Image (tube, rainbow, N blue to C red):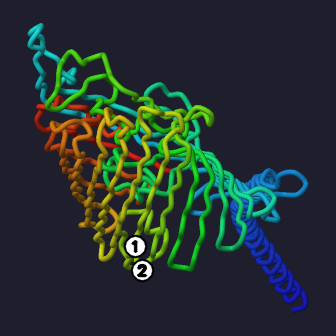
Amino acid sequence: MTCKMFFAFGGALLMGIAGVATAETQSEAQLKAELSAVQTRLAQLEAKQSNTWLSQRRTEEIKSLISDVLADADTRASLLEGGATAGHNGKHFYLASEDGGFLLEISGQLQFRHVTSFQNDHPEIDNDTDTEISLVDDETESGFVMRRAKVQFKGHIADPRIQYNIRFAVNSQDNSVTADKIVISYELMDDLTLWGGEDKAPFLREELTSSKYQTAVERSYVNEIFTADSVQGIGVTWEANENVIVNVAITDGVRSGSNSTTQDPLTQAGGLVPGSQFRVGEDFDPEDLGEGEGDFSRSSVSKDFNDDQTDFAITARVDVRLAGNWEQMTDFAAWEGEDMALFFGAAIHYEVGETGDSAQNNDFLRWTVDASLEMNNFNVYAAVVGNHTNLEDENDVIGEDRDTHGVVIQAGYMIIPNELEPFIRYEFIDLDDVYGNSYDEVTLLTFGVNRYFNKHNAKFTLDIVWALDSLPVAQEDLGLQVDDPSGEDQVTIRAQFQLLF
């Protein structure tokens, strides 16, 4: 019995050991499988973590690089030990000292243009030689021109009251560079500024309005005939109150600035056509061609103080603001959202001829009155200008006193606000036989359209100028040429793209 129990117990023990061994074997395999799965998952997590770490590291490196670049830019913007600031204020690029004592603003203008001019050849006949004499070389002229390329530097030095303004312009004919504005000014009081140098005379508002803010491709023919243009001298600007500004200048006379044209169309005697000795009128005789009579020295304005043709010249202008802001006065376009603007202006220019000019004293008085209105995407401008010239000498042989007048009316409307603006302009000049009765009156019509891409900063203008009468004076910058006395109408097509910076 005892033996059987022993064997039974031994068998059971062996079977238990075998079961445990089997269980242990199965558990070990399972653990190995699980361990392998964990190792695989861990490898995947490590790979993912490595990629994330690389991405984070790359991000940190880029951030560090940007920070270094910005720090370098800040260092370069801090000029000298005093430091400075630089940037764009919405209108100009600028450099300024940290304390505001020094300021330099930089701006520029580019105008690229195509012009085509059509006119008729109507020559005079020399009865003695039976030959034709004509002022028209070619009835059709066409070509491209870089009409304006300018860079301007202005600001103040040491004190905001001490200001400077110098503007360089590239000549459209030979690409030579001259300064068409050189001004030093000092603010005596908050409302009183004294200036000296070379600048536009405070006379015609159309001339005072920058070429970059004109509605048409160019200023009017009336403006070019009556303008005082750029002058050399001194002046004062007085802001009488917030609505009235007065400008007075004492200068060397009309067109005395170095960048002005040398001929003044209204102070020449005997109907002399600029650029020739061709006299016109009822008493025209081809034999006069190339001769010239009398004293025409006043038609050539010297830029030297000791050789100009003026003893004394004074210009005074007053501008009154009834509505709007002053910036709207020098911008004929009516922008969407702008408040209504209404301005009136008047000016006179009086000039005394050179002492010792016995044949022709050339004292003359010019005056003008203008007004403009801007509202609801509509703008209109009108001006009247006159000139009284003394052409008489002691023996009354050179000529008679002349009273010439001009009128300009211009209007535009934004049919697409801030983008598309058609416009029209009417001009009339009564020359009072300055160039003979063949050129007694001149009428011109201009109509066109402006496409604004970024206000005046990027603008395309297309217009057509129709001169209904013969033109006595060429204005090539306008695309207009001198006509024969018996010539018919002249048509000029102009297209221009402008960039400002």
Q: Is residue 205 left or right of residue 123?
A: right
Q: Which residue is pictured at 34% across the width and 69% down the height?
A: 372
Q: Which residue is pictured at 25% across the width and 18% down the height?
A: 289
> Is residue 72 positioned above or below 299 on the image?
below
Outermost front residue: 395
Question: Of helix, strand and loop, which one carries label 2?
Answer: strand
Figure quadrant of residue 496: top left
* Residue 301 visible in the shown view: yes
Quick one: label 1, few (<14), some, or many (20+) residues within 10 Å? many
Q: Look at the numbered discs 1 and 2 and tell me whether their residues touch, using CB distance below 8 Å.
A: yes
* Residue 54 visible in the shown view: no
Q: Is residue 249 left or right of residue 394?
A: right
Q: Residue 322 shows which numbered tag? A: 2
Q: Which residue is pictured at 80% across the width and 52% down the height?
A: 72
Picture coordinates of residue 299 (x, y %)?
41, 33
For marks 1 and 2 on the same chain, the one whose residue lies earlier in the sequence: 2
Quarter the N terminus occupies: bottom right
Picture coordinates of residue 311 (x, y %)?
56, 43
Pick the residue in front: 415 or 445.
445
Q: Is residue 117 left or right of residue 145?
A: left
> What amino acid type is highlighted by mark number 1?
Phe
Outermost top residue: 129
Pick the residue in front: 378 or 47.
378
Figure quadrant of residue 12: bottom right
Picture coordinates of residue 152 (x, y %)?
59, 47
Picture coordinates of residue 59 (x, y %)?
71, 59
Question: Of helix, strand and loop, which one carries label 1?
Answer: strand
Quick one: label 2, few (<14), some, or many (20+) residues within 10 Å? some
> Is residue 423 positioned above or below 391 on the image?
below
> What amino acid type is highlighted by mark number 2?
Leu
Which residue bears the numbered disc 1? 343
Pick the residue in front: 375 or 484.
484
